[in-house]
Image (tube, grey):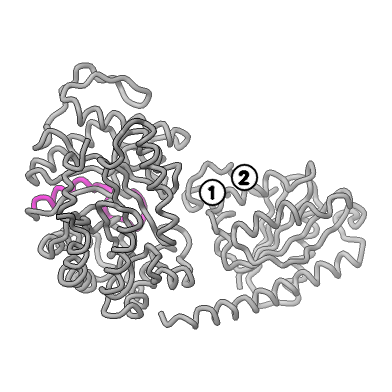
Amino acid sequence: MKITLLSGSTVGTKTRTAMNYTKNILEEKYPGEEVTLLDLAEFDVDFSDGRDFREYHGDTKTVTETIMESDVIFIGTPIFQASIPGSLKNVFDLLPQNGLRDKIAGILVTAGSSKHYLIAETQLKPILAYMKAQIVQTYTFMEERDFYRKEIVNEDAVFRIERLVEDAIVLAETYKNIKRLKEEQYDF
Amino acid sequence: MSFKDYRIDENEGLEFGLYTLGDHLENPHTGKTISAQQRLKEIIEMSKLAEEAGIDVVSVGESHQDHFTTQAHSVLLSAIAQATEQIKVSSSSTIISTSDPVRVFEDFATIDLISDGRAEVVAGRASRVGLYELLGYDLRDYEELFEEKFELLLKINQEERVNWEGKFRKPLRDAHILPRPKNGQLPIWRAVGGTPASAIKAAYQGVPMYQAMLGGPASVFKQPIDAYRETLGHLGYDSAAFPVATAGFFYAAETTQQALKEYYPHINEGMKLTNGRGFPKQAFAQGAHLKNVMNVGSPQEIIEKILYQHETFNHQRYIAQMDFGGVPFDKIMKNIELIGQEILPAVKKYTAKK
């Protein structure tokens, strides 16, 4: 399985820190899987201009094609101005309609305040649903106080990331079966 | 304007055509890819067979990207014009936005003379937009490029000597645009993407619409056609004088199951390469339903589908895409045979108005 971790911010360190933990847990528990981390802070991504995702060049092409080739995507997002950052929304805008069909999407949120706990529910999930992703319903929400000097200091947050990873992989395996059963109905 | 200006005679029934995008893809059943040269020659051969089977129209689309062979679609259409005698020679579509309308008119008027008055143009603005960068245009001008150049093409078609000024081309001062088509004017249609918003723009330009439909219920594709006719009416045109054409996937085999089985890998694998993602099996299976516009099935089921679509759309032409995704030539021949022997006679019989 191809698993991609998308760290959706070009600002700050909490989201990237949470993605590092996610990557370590994945590599430890599922050593056979192909795991790629895309940190938008490390890429120079163009704004979407409406063209097909394969017609971009350089970093933009790398980011879009890596996502389109993935079976599972973990999306890490901070909350800026009570929303997901523009850098992450731009990635969605670069992808085609129904671009996340047959892909599993897990969500990690790092926020400055607990007041933002429903942002992913009301703003990120509708985008993923529109793009036809299979969403891991429970997401991991972390706050400022869970982090200290690029480490997660709240053990419960680490447990929640572990559960998210397990849930995503179980959903991916299950969805593979669902798809197989669905396709077996047709003899073409 | 009348159907006659578009060389359409409703007494003869629904026109039936073939169209190709000129895609150049592997046959997923065998893993083999023919050469670009062979693909081009097979398109010419397909046109000849279509003519022999009594098919009304053949058309070729302009596509500038990997996995295609028809970048110079008008050159190929010219060869088809020379190789045939009766069949209408059309485009599906010509990307007017990134071309000089003068050159497009010169090309198609020439094809019209070579073909003895069988050429027409379907102008579009491309759904795959890589050609804007290739040919030196800014994608931000997408809409305006199309409207301005389309209008200029219409003007050249109507007036032999042209005075014109616009944003995307040097002005024309009493320019004499030659050659002139055999019957004075070319039929010029507008390609429509399948939304009402796109269709009403064909009405704004006062030209017939050509609707692309991949799959889905006929009732959904009726909405743009209704919006088009309604807008024509608001603008003071007689909407009954403007023909409507539809275009979509087609594949016939002895049984529907066989047709689905043979065609699905071509569509799914082909779309992965040309559009970046495949075609869901579930949606393809639904394509076999009577009320779905995808004309894949046994000849009898396809006849029923086309007649249902005709009842729903009251359209004047349907063109079929049966060669997508590396369909081998023997299957193309088989499809043309089924069309000529079974599908076409029934469709004509039930849709002719005389």
* Point 62% across, 46% down: residue: A90
Image quadrant where one finds the N terminus of chain A: bottom right
- Residue B260 lies, in percent from the top left, at 36, 75
* Point 39% across, 46% down: residue: B226
CA–CA distance between discs 1 and 2?
A: 8 Å
Task: Answer with left or right where residue A18 lies relative to residue B42.
Answer: right
Residue type marked 1: Gly
Label of residue A58 in the image: 1
* Point 68% across, 65% down: residue: A135
| Region of the chain picked out in magenta, as a range | B64-83
**How many numbered badges does the structure rendering display?**
2
User: Where is A117 relative to B242, above or below?
Assistant: below
User: Where is A93 relative to B334, above or below?
Assistant: above
Label of residue B281 in the image: none
Disc 1, SS? helix
Magenta stretch contains residue B65: yes
- Outermost residue, front side: B354
- Residue A154 lies, in percent from the top left, at 92, 63
Q: Which residue is mark 2?
A: A44
- Give the quarter of the image for residue B338: bottom left
Q: Are marks 1 and 2 in contact (CB under 8 Å)?
A: yes
- Give the quarter of the image for residue B114: top left
Disc 2, SS? loop
- Outermost residue, top side: B173
Badge 1: chain ID: A
- Residue A86 lies, in percent from the top left, at 68, 43
Image quadrant where one finds the C terminus of chain A: bottom left
Residue type marked 2: Asp
- Give the quarter of the image for residue A121: bottom right
Counting residues from the start of the chain, the first of labels 1 and 2 encountered is 2
Badge 2: chain ID: A
